[in-house]
């Protein structure tokens, strides 16, 4: 994928923002136990930053998978049109 011509378009990087917001809000507000904890200790802030870091990595994986599937479909349909 690091071959010349195979770059991820800006649209997919912009798509990362709503995916990150959705994943982080889901992880922080409903999937974790933040209701019982506060942000009074340094450990709690570190846990929040760790959750946000995991969400960034997860949204990056989602964007790359979406780009990969879109490029595969694009190549498949362009090859079908050339064979006709």
Image (cartoon, helix red, strand yellow):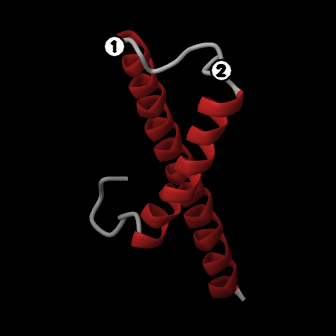
Q: Confirm or deny contact between disc 2 and disc 1 (CB under 8 A).
A: no
Residue 33: percent from left, percent from top:
65, 17
Image point (61%, 80%), residue name: 78
Q: Which mark is residue 80?
A: none
Say above or below: 70 vs 19. below
Say above or below: 80 vs 68. below
Label 2 crowd bin: few (<14), some (14–19), many (20+), radius 10 Å: few
Residue under numbered circle 2 = 35
Residue 32: percent from left, percent from top:
64, 21
Residue at disc 2, secondary structure? loop
User: Foreground: 12 or 28?
Assistant: 28
Image point (41%, 32%), residue name: 53
Label 1 crowd bin: few (<14), some (14–19), many (20+), radius 10 Å: few
User: Foreground: 65 or 56?
Assistant: 56
The C terminus lies in quadrant: bottom right
Residue 7 as seen in the image, left or right of residue 21:
left
Say above or below: 56 vs 40. below
Image point (39%, 27%), residue name: 49
Image point (56%, 14%), residue name: 37
Gap between marks 2 and 1, in whole Å?
17 Å
Dot 2 or dot 1: first in sequence order is 2
Q: Quadrant of residue 36?
A: top right
Say above or below: 21 vs 38. below
Residue 64: percent from left, percent from top:
50, 51
User: Foreground: 84 or 16?
Assistant: 16
- Residue ranking furthest to the left: 4
Residue under numbered circle 1 = 42
């Amino acid at each position: 994928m690091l071959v010349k011509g195979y770059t991820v378009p800006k649209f997919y990087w912009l798509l990362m923002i709503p995916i990150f917001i959705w994943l982080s809000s889901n992880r922080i507000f409903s999937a974790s136990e933040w209701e019982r904890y506060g942000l009074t200790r340094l450990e709690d802030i570190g846990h929040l930053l760790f959750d946000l870091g995991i969400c960034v990595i997860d949204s990056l994986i989602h964007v790359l998978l979406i780009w990969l599937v879109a490029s595969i479909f694009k190549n498949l349909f362009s090859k079908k049109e050339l064979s006709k």
